[in-house]
Amino acid sequence: MKKAWSVRRNEEAVSPVIATILMVAITVVLAAVLYVMVLGFGGGGSSTPAATYQKASIADGQRITIVSITEADVGWTDVTIQLTDGTSFAEWAPVTEDLDDGDPLTVAYGTDALGTLTVYCNVTDISGNGFVSGSDSFTLQCAGFLSSVTYTAVLVYEPTGERIGNGITFTG
């Protein structure tokens, strides 16, 4: 009876050099895939939350209240308050350490120039947790807001540089 298979002793498999190159290539590809997964480049990137605002007139300005925000973990350090009159910008960057003592807290963030105007800003974190949430607010005050100018106030999400919602407009 003859064997159905026979051992071929003269043929070699892959050469040792080719095998080494293949192993190194596979290792490099696996390391790159793991690197991308760990750093989140695979589609889990940062996205800008959305928010809705409500305004209320106060002496010499406006109180802007955040009615809702789509993400619960947006810290005040991740946002910049921005006010524009269409040509100039004023900006304030709240600091979480000032707003996370556990009590409702209003913190003054000083003044910034908006064209020829000097605008004063303060932030109220209702829950005192350092995160932007519904019912938190910021006030923008200036004795010189002009009734003929439309102003837009908005929060800008710093990780993406995009606006959180459409903001809110008011006239002086």
Image (cartoon, grey):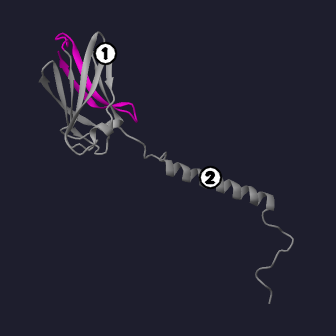
Three-letter amino acid code at disc 2?
A: Val
Q: Nearer the viewer, residue 105 or 12?
A: 105
Snapshot quadrant of residue 19: bottom right
Q: Is residue 25 magenta?
A: no
Q: CA distance from mark 1 to mark 2?
A: 52 Å
Q: Nearer the viewer, residue 54 or 9?
A: 54
Where does the image place residue 101, in percent across and percent down from the top left? 26, 43
Snapshot quadrant of residue 125: top left
* Helix, strand or loop for disc 2: helix
Where does the image place residue 50, in percent across and percent down from the top left? 28, 37
Snapshot quadrant of residue 26: bottom right
In the image, the segment drawn in magenta is 143-172
Q: In the drawing, what numbered circle is on residue 163? A: none
Q: Is residue 133 above or below residue 65?
A: below
Where does the image place residue 4, in percent across and percent down from the top left? 76, 82
Q: In the drawing, what numbered circle is on residue 29? A: 2
Q: Main secondary structure of the magenta part?
A: strand
Where does the image place residue 144, in percent across and percent down from the top left? 20, 11
Q: Is residue 147 magenta?
A: yes
First reached walking from the N terminus: tag 1 or tag 2? 2
- The residue to which callout 1 is attached is 113
Q: Residue at x 12, y 20 (%)?
A: 59
Quadrant location, the C terminus: top left
Q: Residue at x 25, y 25 (%)?
A: 121
Q: Residue at x 23, y 18 (%)?
A: 151
